[in-house]
Image: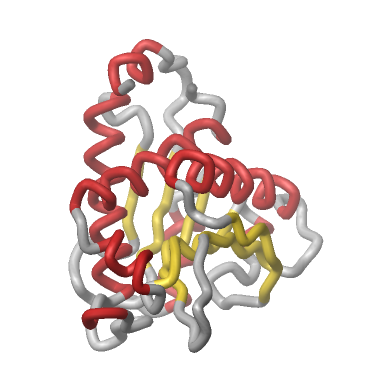
């Protein structure tokens, strides 16, 4: 599959992708089954996406992370970085939690009507469809919220917050403990972004 993807690369202007890793440092984010932490899952996924960009597309995308290790970055600095880099896409990675037996992947777009709102929805659907169809996760849809990390971002670029799954769900928490599954999630997200940017 990787060989096929390499053959499908369309050469053109390098796209800039900023991936925001939710939480970090003293802020663990959601803590789930067997003490799995949201901040660790998203860091593992983002690092794998960097590897995929190099391995599949020879670094065709210019990808920046808001953090490269277990550190806490302010919410304002996360979106500020994307604006300073003139990003083509902004993706904030998170994991979900619930007191009930919730499961699945969902996407959030800022609840505004800005120039990039429709593009944000399309980006979210591209990642959501790729992730749920290929990985078998429940599709929870695209939703709207006033998250600070998304606030105002869609005035500059398509921006979404992706909830990868529920660390409080036994099956999904167990899934994220396995390196091969982290690779699968990362590939699905990576292909979803690439499809949106018309690279494949």
Front in this rendered view, residue 186 or 63: 186
Taking the view exactly as shown, the residue that stands out farthest to the right is: 113
**Could you tell me which residue is drawn at 76 percent across and 51 percent down?**
115
| Relative height, residue 20 to residue 13 (above, below) | below
The reply to whether residue 72 is in sight is no
Percent position of residue 35, x then y: 23, 82
Q: Name the foreground residue: 73 vs 188.
A: 188
Q: Left or right: where does residue 19 sit relative to residue 200? A: left
> Could you say which quadrant of the image residue 189 lies in?
top left
Name the image quarter holding residue 155.
bottom right
Q: Residue at x 62, y 54 (%)?
A: 156
Q: Does residue 9 lie above or below 184 as drawn?
A: above
Q: Residue at x 66, y 76 (%)?
A: 146
Question: Which of the pair 89/170 is nearer the observer?
Answer: 170
Residue 175 in percent (x, y) is at 30, 60
Residue 187 percent across, percent down from the top left: 35, 40
| In the foreground, 13 or 159 | 159
Tell me what residue is drawn at x 59 percent, y 41 percent: 126
């Amino acid at each position: 599959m990787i060989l096929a993807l390499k053959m499908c690369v369309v050469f053109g202007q390098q796209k800039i992708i900023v991936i925001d890793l939710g939480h970090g440092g003293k802020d663990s984010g959601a803590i789930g089954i067997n003490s799995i932490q949201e901040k660790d899952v998203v860091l593992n996924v983002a690092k794998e996406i960097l590897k995929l960009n190099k391995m599949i597309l020879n670094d065709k995308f210019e990808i920046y992370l808001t953090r490269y290790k277990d550190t806490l970055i302010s919410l304002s600095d996360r979106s500020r970085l994307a604006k300073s880099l003139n990003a083509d896409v902004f993706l904030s990675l998170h994991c979900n939690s619930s007191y009930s037996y919730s499961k699945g992947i969902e996407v959030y777009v800022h609840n505004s009507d800005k120039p990039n709102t429709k593009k944000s929805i399309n980006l979210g659907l591209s990642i959501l469809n790729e992730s749920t169809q290929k990985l078998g996760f429940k599709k929870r849809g695209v939703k709207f919220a006033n998250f600070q990390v998304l606030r105002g971002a869609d005035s500059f670029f398509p921006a979404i917050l992706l909830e990868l799954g529920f660390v409080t769900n036994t099956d999904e928490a167990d899934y994220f403990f396995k390196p091969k599954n982290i690779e699968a999630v990362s590939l699905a997200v990576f292909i979803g972004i690439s499809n949106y940017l018309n690279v494949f």
